[in-house]
Image: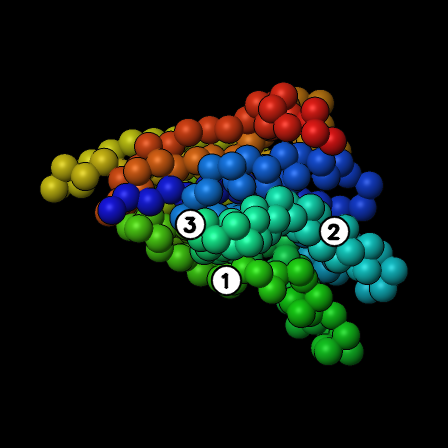
């Protein structure tokens, strides 16, 4: 029996950014009632720890707490309509809806782990324990999870250096199975077939946030933003349906 999967790309929440689109997504998910909800990672942007990549600054606790609390608040906003609908069905003794929630850790969450590795004094002070992920089935950064024959990860690697694959076509060619990843600022898609005739899809899922990123400059922003519905998912094959952030706003913002 085929399944339905909702995919949420990078949300990159930090202090001061809009969050209402996450409620719109939660309302849409509650209405559609998929079998799986997959968040592809980088929900917590963690700008306070970005300097650890270059070794330029020491840890500053207040900004870390802002990063964590902002992401945790946004996660509650996303899940509130979903939990509300699950409770409604249970209370009304109707057919139950218990989706499997899958979270793929992103490189931005991985900043927490690297910070501890670079400065042992932070061990037991900060960690993944701070992230509001108790409702999710969590997979490590770059650990693929396969659902109904489709592989999901924050990104898939290529070559001995383990760099992200450069395109959806390369993703499909190198992995030889349907794969979905985030990490990249815009969407990209490629199609193929297995020897048994099963349709395969490689998908860069894009992003799901309203704000612009200053590091992208004037021309780097403006990427497609939204979530994905995967219909009739079975044995690695599915029909993909992009759901833009503008569509969600038009449909659900009136309830704000």
- Badge 3 density bin: few <14, some 14–19, many ≥20, Cα 10 Å: few
| Residue 237 seen in render | yes
Between discs 3 and 2, the one toward the N terminus: 2
Report the front residue among 63 and 30: 30
Q: Residue 59 — which label?
A: none
The single residue placed furthest to the left in the displayed view is 196
User: Dot 1 corresponds to which residue?
Assistant: 137
User: Dot 2 corresponds to which residue?
Assistant: 73
Secondary structure beneath label 3: loop
Residue 79 relative to residue 206: left or right: right
Between discs 1 and 3, the one toward the N terminus: 3
Q: CA distance from mark 1 to mark 3?
A: 23 Å
User: Dot 3 corresponds to which residue?
Assistant: 95
Residue at the (82%, 55%) spot, across then down: 66
* Residue 218 position within the rendered picture, expressed as x and y whole percent measured from the top left: 71, 23
Does the CB distance between marks 1 and 3 fall below 8 Å?
no
| On screen, residue 127 above or below 187 | below
Q: How is the image coloured?
A: rainbow
């Amino acid at each position: 029996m085929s399944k339905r999967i909702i995919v949420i790309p990078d949300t990159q929440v930090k202090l001061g950014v809009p969050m209402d689109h996450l409620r719109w997504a939660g309302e849409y998910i509650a209405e559609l009632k998929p079998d799986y909800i997959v968040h592809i990672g980088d929900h917590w942007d963690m700008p306070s720890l970005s300097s650890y990549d270059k070794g330029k600054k020491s840890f500053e606790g207040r900004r870390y707490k802002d990063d964590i609390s902002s992401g945790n608040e946004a996660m509650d906003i996303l899940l509130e309509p979903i939990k509300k609908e699950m409770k409604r069905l249970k209370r009304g003794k109707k057919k139950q809806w218990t989706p499997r929630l899958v979270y793929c850790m992103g490189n931005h969450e991985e900043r927490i782990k690297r910070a501890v590795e670079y400065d042992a004094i932070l061990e037991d002070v900060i960690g993944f324990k701070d992230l509001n992920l108790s409702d999710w089935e969590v997979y490590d950064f770059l650990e693929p999870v396969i659902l109904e024959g489709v592989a999901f990860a924050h990104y898939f690697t290529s070559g001995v250096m383990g760099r992200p694959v450069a395109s959806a076509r390369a993703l499909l060619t190198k992995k030889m199975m349907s794969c979905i990843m985030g990490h990249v600022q815009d969407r990209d898609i490629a199609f193929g077939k297995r020897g048994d005739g099963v349709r395969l899809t490689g998908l860069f899922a894009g992003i799901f946030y309203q704000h612009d990123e200053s590091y992208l400059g004037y021309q780097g922003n403006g990427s497609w933003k939204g979530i994905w519905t995967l219909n009739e998912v079975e044995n690695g094959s599915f029909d993909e349906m992009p759901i833009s952030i503008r569509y969600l706003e038009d449909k659900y913002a009136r309830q704000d």
